[in-house]
Image: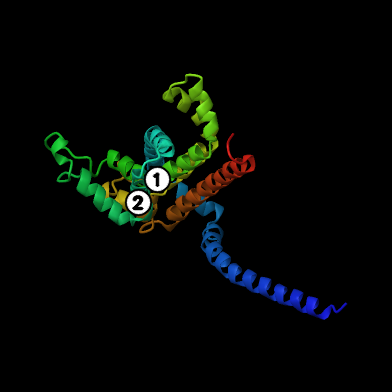
Amino acid sequence: MNVQPELALRRRNRRQHALFAALGGLLLAFLAAPLMGLVWSVSWSDLVAGLAHPLVWPALRLSLLTTSISLACVVVLGTPLAWALSRARLGWVRLVETVVQLPIVIPPAVAGVALLLAFGRRGLLAALYPPGWSLSFSTAAVVLAQIFVSAPFFVQAALSAFRRIDPSLLLVARSFGARPWRVFARVGLPLAAPGLLAGAILSWARALGEFGATLMFAGNLEGKTQTLPLAIYTAWESDLRAAQALSLVLVILALVLLIGVRALIGSGAALGPVR
């Protein structure tokens, strides 16, 4: 038996694997370098001093308040939408899905301009406002901006979760006389719960990190519209330690949320199609 061709093939495969690893390692190093720089450049004393900056806690409170409200709105309104889209079999479903997903790909500045032209003082819906009142440059504008950019993440995750449910389970529930709302509440929601939770986490994380649309539509008013990303932008001009501390807080939150989402997705994949 001639082993030379087999040895040559193994060597060639090892070289190819090494090339793939080297190319992938370059991208991994590039992605990790900024995060490592952020972590290693902040000492414990700098972190404590940065968190004591007067911009930090008002921005943190406002971010938690607005993202909680926006997440509640997204879940309450997005869950029925995802359920309806998952059950529909009409041609317009693809169009609706495209419209829902569009905020993911449009630039944040464009989203801010669009929100301003729709809900601003002279916007599309300005005629519905009381005289002298406007949503723009208010805390409500922050919530609207967060809903606009984060809702697609939840709706897409919820849509995928609902579509993974075995249709025969829903058919059995209907055959026993359950009304559509009862099928949704007693069968659909429990079976899709891991996917819904993962989508909610992603949506909340996107809302927490929103910057461009908020700046354009709500402004950067301390205590009123200044969320954590806007506080980082402001602190960068005056106190680098505060900007670093806030950045580190957001990175840690993002890491925790990502681990949670991966755990939920992993558990759902291990279970396979919901039956």
Residue 187: horizontal and vertical position, in percent?
52, 27
- Picture quadrant where residue 125 is located: top left
Looking at this rendering, what residue extends furthest in the right direction?
1
**Which residue is label 1 attached to?**
152
Q: Is residue 23 left or right of residue 183?
A: right
Looking at this rendering, what residue extends furthest in the top direction?
177
Residue 18: horizontal and vertical position, in percent?
67, 72
Residue 152: horizontal and vertical position, in percent?
40, 45
Disc on res. 184? none
Nearer the observer, 149 or 256: 149
- The C terminus sits in image quarter: top right
**Which residue is label 2 attached to?**
102
Relative to 96, say whether 5 is above or below.
below
Q: Contact (CB < 8 A) between labels 2 and 1?
A: yes
Q: So how many labels did they put on this image?
A: 2
**Could you tell me how far apart the alpha carbons at marks 2 and 1 are, in whole angstroms?**
8 Å
Amino acid under disc 1: Pro
Identify the element where label 2 is drawn: helix
